[in-house]
Amino acid sequence: GDCGDILRLIRELAEFEKLSDQVKISEEVLRADGFGENPFYHCFVAEIIPAPGERQGPCIVGYGLYYFIYSTWKGRNIYLEDIYVMPEYRGQGIGSKIIKKVAEVALDQGCSQFRLEVLEWNKKAMDLYKALGAQDVTQAEGWHAFRFEGEAMRKLAGR
């Protein structure tokens, strides 16, 4: 059931980022890619446990989806693709806890860096990352993110 909840939150995040039209993934793909023999990603979820006597079950209110990458300069890295907490649960330290758990995994796996990206208008997120000790490499080193997708990727691969 968690994949359905994660997909719900992925859609909420995309809406928050004003990029809803870009979400093409399905619950089945999330399940296959995250829970197969060789998972492409790992995920932490934040659950709110109902008070004793409440009928509803635990509710997933946030997630952090990450995977491992490699730097030819630094070796093992971890990349946090998404971090999201539902608006009504923000300000309670949930996002920070997810980020800290990813940092623990990074250290346990011998990673030298913990990477993530944030949209330029999301100042609250940038402030949080900086407060937690992250360095803004866009400012410090001038890196730009690029991607190939769809037709451009097929053309590049000669398909």
Image (spheres, rainbow, N blue to C red):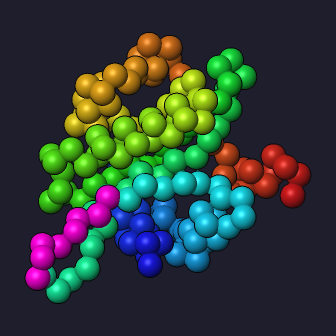
> Looking at the rendering, which quadrant does residue 20 occupy?
bottom left
Residue 52 counted in the magenta span: yes
In the displayed structure image, the side of residue 137 where residue 59 appears, left or right: left
In the displayed structure image, the side of residue 69 where residue 128 appears, left or right: left
Say whether residue 91 is visible: yes
> Looking at the rendering, which quadrant does residue 58 occupy?
bottom left
Q: Which residue is drawn at 74% across and 51% down?
A: 153
Q: Which residue is drawn at 36% across and 65% down?
A: 9
Residue 146 higher or lower than 87, as above or below: above
Q: Front-most of 26 and 156? A: 26
The magenta stretch is 46-53
Where residue 146 appears, as percent x and y from the top left, is 60, 36
Counting the numbered discs, the total is 0
Q: Residue at x 49, y 61 (%)?
A: 22
Indicate the quadrant containing the N terminus: top left, top right, bottom left or bottom right: bottom left
Q: Front-most of 143 and 131? A: 131
Where residue 156 appears, as percent x and y from the top left, is 81, 46
Residue 130 higher or lower than 156, as above or below: above
Residue 110 counted in the magenta span: no
Q: Which residue is drawn at 21% across and 44% down?
A: 93
Where residue 110 appears, as percent x and y from the top left, is 61, 29
Indicate the quadrant containing the C terminus: top left, top right, bottom left or bottom right: bottom right
Q: Front-most of 119 and 109? A: 109
Say whether residue 20 is visible: no
Magenta: main secondary structure = loop
Give the residue at the far front of this rendering.
Answer: 52
Where residue 52 appears, as percent x and y from the top left, is 12, 76
> Looking at the rendering, which quadrant does residue 75 occupy?
top right
In the displayed structure image, the side of residue 15 where residue 43 appears, left or right: right
Give the residue at the far bottom of this rendering.
Answer: 55
